[in-house]
Amino acid sequence: MREALIRLLEPEVTTRGLELVELEYHAHRGGGLLRLYIDRPGGETDANQVTVEDCEAVSRAVSEALDLSDPIKVEYTLEVSSPGFDRPLRTHEHFVRYVGSRVHVESLLPRDGRRRWTGQLSAVGDTGVTLEVDGKMVELGLNEIKTARLVPEYATRRE
């Protein structure tokens, strides 16, 4: 469902000059929560951050698209916000932008007995990333990554 929602809603975000950083859907008894994280390209600087008005405009547009296509059959709450300091990394471009930053990555399946790594994002290739974790290099394919987020106190953006 997540990928279908991204395909449906990403155009609603990008037509407003914004970027869909991440989308989360959490189902629970009696409904669900659909959360969108949006940003301006280059929005990591104070002068170019997402405003409350941006969030409201995206919320209205996304609500209309969801009402028309009705992909979520239960009641849900829609939240739209900026990505915050521990911003999610979803796309190849997100990873490239933050090479050199400290990240926390969770894989879909265990590797060498673990699914979570925290370390420096050392390199990004066409299909994967390299992390330096505890002095060792760990390579993960983008298709192996369940979630990835910046570790806030170490976030540095590459231009």
Image (cartoon, rainbow, N blue to C red):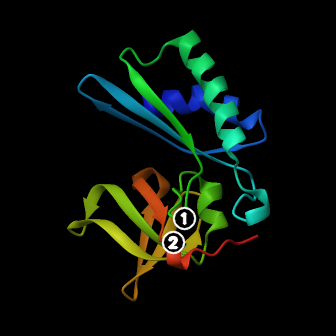
Q: Amino acid at mark 1?
A: Phe
Residue 55 left/right relative to 139? right
- Could you say where residue 73 lies in the image, as x and y percent from the top left? 38, 14
3D distance between C-alphas at marks 1 and 2? 5 Å
Residue 116 left/right relative to 63? left
The disc label shown at residue 1, or none = none
| 23 shown above or below 129 | above
Q: Residue furthest left?
A: 113
| 36 shown above or below 157 | above
Instruction: Point out the image quarter for the N terminus.
Output: top left
Residue 20 picture quarter: top right
* Residue that numbered label 2 is attached to: 152
- Could you say where residue 35 lies in the image, as x and y percent from the top left? 48, 38
Instruction: Look at 45% across and 59% down and name the residue there.
Output: 148
Residue 134 picture quarter: bottom left
Q: How many marks?
A: 2
Q: Earlier in the sequence, mark 1 or mark 2?
A: 1
Q: Amino acid at mark 2?
A: Pro
Instruction: Look at 50% across and 36% down and name the residue there.
Output: 79
Residue 59 picture quarter: top right
| 124 shown above or below 60 | below
Residue 54 left/right relative to 101? right
Q: Please state which of residues 20 and 77 is positioned toward the viewer in this rendering.
A: 77
Secondary structure of the residue carrying tag 2 is helix
Secondary structure of the residue carrying tag 1 is loop
* Residue that numbered label 1 is attached to: 85
- Could you say where residue 151 lies in the image, as x and y percent from the top left? 47, 71
Instruction: Point out the image quarter for the C terminus.
Output: bottom right
Q: Find out whether the residues at labels 1 and 2 contact each other: C-beta distance under 8 Å.
A: yes
- Could you say where residue 58 lies in the image, as x and y percent from the top left? 66, 32
Mark 1: give few (<14), some (14-19) or many (20+) Cα within 10 Å.
some
